[in-house]
């Protein structure tokens, strides 16, 4: 009996099995690398957006401060799976002078986008416009000096004319002037569509309701989405 065909068939099967075993080893070698890359991507450090402001940012009067506009921005970011975290650094009653004193402490942590919302309390207290402007610029200078690559955003504010039409006009112009000087992103009026609308504000007529904050969040998102 001629065993050559059987021997050939045996060698063919052995070669095939060895080839399959080799491919499996290669696959098993590739998988850990793939998993490692995925794990690395999922644990990548998130970039930081800081909202630095007063009671408007802090969500004064709301049962849940996370429903203020900064918290709503975080929810939008999460829904879009963007790699950013929001820090709400709002303090009720804060003036630009207070903010200028507080900013050094805040800058101990890295940030990538800085949204400055201050000045409203200055206007309500009749603080000289020149002082407000100087403090806002000082805050921005400190942020830029510590984190030169951070993107800067300024939230514009307006005050009622009962402080005097001339004062109100000069106050409003401060934000556009600073934005132009620093070539930063300007939200012309943070409370656009909310200010002066009783149903969108708390009884004090100053702080937005939850519905009001939803509109404010849209005003903010419209300007910062291109920075993300």
Image (cartoon, rainbow, N blue to C red):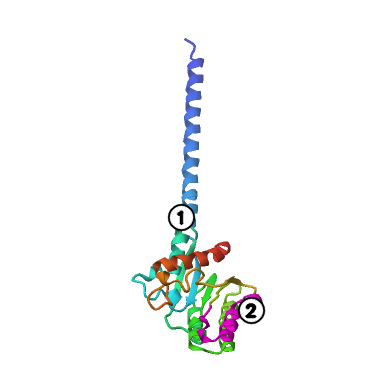
94 vs 156, nearest the viewer = 156
Q: Position of residue 130 (x, y in %)?
A: 59, 88
68 vs 47, nearest the viewer = 68
Does the magenta portion include 179? yes
- Point out the residue furthest to the left here: 63
How busy is the neighbourhood of tag 1: few (under 14 within 10 Å), some, or many (20 plus)?
few
- The residue lying at 53 percent from left, 82 percent from top is 161
Q: Position of residue 151 (x, y in %)?
A: 58, 70
151 vs 132, nearest the viewer = 132
Chief secondary structure of the magenta portion: helix
Segment colored magenta:
158-180
State how many labels appear: 2
Left-right relation of 186 to 196: right
220 vs 140, nearest the viewer = 220
Reading the image, the residue beneath label 1 is: 39
Q: Position of residue 33 (x, y in %)?
A: 49, 50
Reading the image, the residue beneath label 2 is: 177
- The residue lying at 63 percent from left, 79 percent from top is 177
């Amino acid at each position: 009996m001629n065993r050559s065909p059987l021997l050939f068939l045996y060698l063919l099967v052995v070669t095939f099995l060895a080839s399959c075993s080799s491919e499996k080893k290669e696959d098993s070698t590739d998988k850990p690398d793939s998993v490692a890359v995925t794990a690395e991507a999922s644990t990548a450090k998130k970039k930081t957006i800081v909202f630095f402001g007063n009671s408007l940012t802090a969500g004064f009067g709301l049962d849940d401060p996370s429903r203020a506009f900064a918290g709503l921005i975080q929810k939008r970011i999460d829904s879009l799976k963007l790699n950013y975290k929001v820090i709400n650094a709002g303090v009720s009653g804060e003036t630009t002078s207070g903010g200028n004193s507080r900013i050094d402490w805040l800058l101990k942590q890295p940030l990538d986008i800085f949204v400055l919302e201050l000045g409203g309390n200055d206007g309500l207290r009749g603080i000289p416009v020149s002082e407000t402007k100087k403090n806002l610029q000082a805050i921005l200078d400190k942020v830029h000096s510590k984190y030169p690559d951070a993107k800067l955003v300024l939230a514009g504010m307006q005050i009622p004319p009962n402080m005097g039409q001339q004062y109100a006009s000069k106050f409003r112009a401060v934000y556009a002037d600073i934005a132009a000087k620093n070539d930063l992103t300007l939200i012309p009026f943070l409370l656009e569509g909310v200010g002066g609308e009783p149903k969108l504000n708390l009884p004090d007529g100053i702080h937005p309701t939850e519905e009001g904050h939803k509109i404010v969040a849209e005003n903010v998102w419209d300007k910062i989405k291109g920075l993300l």
